[in-house]
Image (spheres, helix red, strand yellow):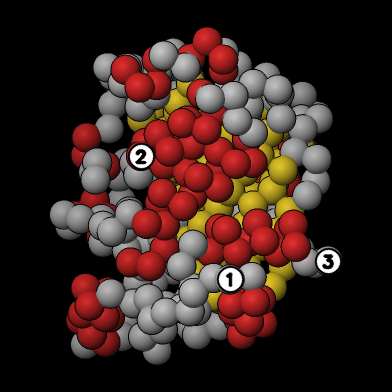
Amino acid sequence: MTTRRTFLQTSLLGAGALALPKAFSSAAGKSSRAKVVSTWDFGVGANGAAWKVLAAGGAALDAVEAGARWAEADLCNPTVGHCGNPDRDGVLTLDASIMAGDGRCGSVAALEDIDHPISVARAVMEKSPHVMLVGAGAQQFAVQQGFAKKKLITPEAAQRWREWLKTAEYKPQINAERAKLPGNKDNHDTLGMLALDASGNLAGACTTSGMAWKLHGRVGDSPIIGAGLYVDNDVGAATASGQGEEMIRNAASHLVVELMRQGRSPAQACREAIDRVVHKRPEASKTLQVCFLAMNKDGEVGAFALHKGFVYAVCDAAKQDALLDSQSVYTTEQT
Ligand code: ASP
């Protein structure tokens, strides 16, 4: 997996293109306005999976599900999917949401022992009368829908939890662990993905194992529509990563979309939402990471973070593996 240290240093809206994979370039004609963007360095791989759908003329909703499934299956990722770090009781609980630009949405929270929570979230959206299912009920629904129930926690994650138990200190880090250790061992980071398809439809997906060492039953922003993800075909889409409690307090992804509706660019909207987070809790903001990523209906992309270190991946017909460095309020990397 790509590490944060390998990202390209580029301007906020500029794109540092790497070589264009042949498999992607052949289909580019079908998807001239299609685009997919994702949070963090593993967003490059997730975008690649989503791009296969978009480049073939597929729907944004199918693309974001494919991209999120890729991230959930990434064996090296302790913050998303079945390799995620558990809570403080040693239980792995997964959160995910999916939303289409016409307002359809579904999510699962605190889901245990079911792989691919993003597909369960889509099933909630398409096969239940509800938007959100949690815990045992989400698991029951998933099994009824044909998802296999299996023990998900990996030996590596269980070992990380045993190490953590030695201090049992719950102290969310800004980017420190992830930056410091090989193999991406941070105690947070979510895949948030936004896609625009060739027909002009938007969709988004968010998937995570949440904050490592959280209280059992804690739900972050990622499965909460409007907090970790919001999509509106009339305006644009936004997603978030970082300390989920701050996104929930501010209905933050919805806020970003509403700011775009009022005329802000995606970058301006993300910046203003970050300012709101700081305004609400100036002291806490010094020690927490909050990151927003947005795309408007024209495919313009922007991001902003509280602290330095947030990177996001952008993929379109011109270039598939750009990784950009977000601007931030605090410009010195803190630990
Ligand atoms: N937002 C996620 C949560 O609070 C974690 C993260 O994105 O880092 O669960």
Q: Nearer the viewer, mark 1 or mark 2?
A: 1
Residue 166 appears at what percent x and percent y?
A: 21, 87
To which residue does mark 3 refer?
A: 129
Q: Which mark is residue 146?
A: 1
Looking at numbered disc 1 in the image, what kind of residue is underneath it? Answer: Gly
Q: Nearer the viewer, residue 107 or 216?
A: 107
Residue 271 appears at what percent x and percent y?
A: 59, 36
Give whichever of discs 3 and 1 has the lower sequence position.
3
Looking at numbered disc 3 in the image, what kind of residue is underneath it? Answer: Pro
Q: CA distance from mark 3 to mark 2?
A: 33 Å
The answer to whether residue 169 of the structure is visible from this angle is yes
Q: Is residue 148 above or below residue 242?
A: below
Find numbered disc 2 in the image and state the secondary structure of the residue it sits on. helix
Give whichever of discs 3 and 2 has the lower sequence position.
2
Q: Nearer the viewer, residue 3 or 285?
A: 3
Q: Which mark is residue 45?
A: 2
Q: Residues within 10 Å of mark 1 (few under 14, many from 20)?
A: few
Quarter of the N terminus within the rendering: top left
Q: Nearer the viewer, residue 295 or 111?
A: 111
Q: Nearer the viewer, mark 3 or mark 1?
A: 1
Furthest residue in direction top, as rendered: 29
The answer to whether residue 96 of the structure is visible from this angle is no
